[in-house]
Amino acid sequence: MAGTAVRGRLSWSLATVGLVVEETRTVRTLSLDVAGWPGHRAGQHVDIRLTAEDGYVAERAYSIASAPGEPPAITVQRLSDGEVSGYLTQEARPGDQCQVRGPIGGYFVWEPAFGGPLLLLAGGSGIVPLRSILRHRGFTGSSVPARLLYSARQLADVIYRDELDGHSASGDVRVSYALTRSQPPGWTGYARRVDDEMLAEVAWPAADKPLAYVCGPTSFVETVAAGLVRLGYPPVRVRTERFGATGA
Amino acid sequence: MEPLDGRAVKGSAVEGSALDGNAIGGLLIEVFGAEMTTASSVCGSCGATRQVAELAVYRHQLGSVVRCRGCDSVLMVFVQIRGITCVDLQGLASLG
């Protein structure tokens, strides 16, 4: 196919920061007020663009943390050298403005009609689009059974913990945690990285024709996706979203 | 734009880890004017058909390189400079 040059379309909208929630020591959720927001699907993302006073522009992609029907919100983890995440997690205040483009993506999305059973697997801040999916499932009264396996370094790094434990306590979703670096005294969850044995214990049997969503750092996603395929999951039933060290 | 040399070179020449086609969904909307992550792509080298979201994306300072997850061939290159996006789709047999 031939190459071409395209002049950028005017696809950016102005977003105003609304409610800010501190999720963990390094993670915040920012609700965004975007005029004319067309609504989003569970699992989609937005691009955020910040322009410095000297005209320097930085763009990053962030998964949408809120459910369809709610205002768009992003959950951002501060990275040690993150020029965008540093601003969003430390400086941004309600009323501040940035540019947003989206919603984006039609692959890593879930709708009740897709069915399940749902198997959600998160590594670190890979929980964000899965939280949107879980909320969407809850708000729509979907009866699709769901399980979540969430890998984090330590309990203090678990994002949305109260909300997830609420699902767990009500028996609505079976939530399993894998704490890879340190565990609190008396911890009864997993205390290692995700491996095939853990997946075999947590995952729905392949015979149930589950639908899996895997989101996290590249190494996590590849380990999990390959493990699910070894358990008999057809690759087309394992949807993946990887993010790099520079933050998704 | 001239085609990249060595488009069939294996991924060893690529730094960093690959993201998914999803990561450039916004850029693709800007270029094509439509949601492209679920569009079907056919690799010009090995013939594999995949949704764009399933392709491997390597982001660089100047733009993004999209490779086949099967054979590592370069499928698409996007370079952004001064508000212009240069697009090379010559590694694709088809997209749509």
Image (cartoon, coloured by chain):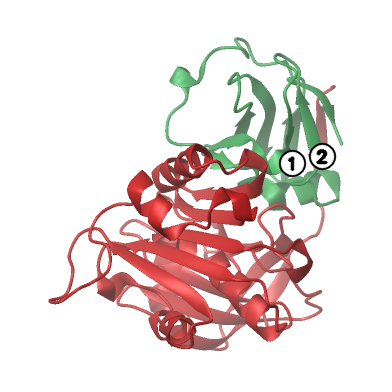
Chain colours: A red, B green
Q: Give SS at disc 2.
A: strand
Instruction: Give the residue at mark 2.
Output: A6
Give me the chain letter of mark 2: A
Say which residue appears at 60% left-offset and 47% top-offset.
Answer: A238
Q: Nearer the viewer, residue A63 or A192?
A: A192
Q: Residue furthest left?
A: A185
Name the residue tied to disc 1: B84
Name the spot of residue A107 as percent of width and height, x first: 71, 52
Q: Secondary structure at mark 1?
A: strand
Relative horizontal placement of residue A142, taking residue A146 as reference (left or right): right
Mark 2 touches mark 1? (CB < 8 Å): yes
Binning the other alpha carbons within 10 Å of mark 1 as few (below 14), some (14 to 19) or many (20 upward) gives some
Residue A199: image location, x then y, percent: 41, 52
Report the side of A29 relative to A25 (left or right). right
Camera-side residue of A151 and B74: A151
**Residue B8 in view of the camera:** yes
Number of other residues with Cα within 10 Å of mark 2, as a class: few under 14, some 14 to 19, many 20 or more: some
Residue type marked 1: Ile
Q: CA distance from mark 2 to mark 1?
A: 6 Å
In the orientation shown, which residue stands out farthest toward the front? Answer: A207
Does residue A70 show up? no
Is B71 situated left or right of A159 in this image? Answer: right
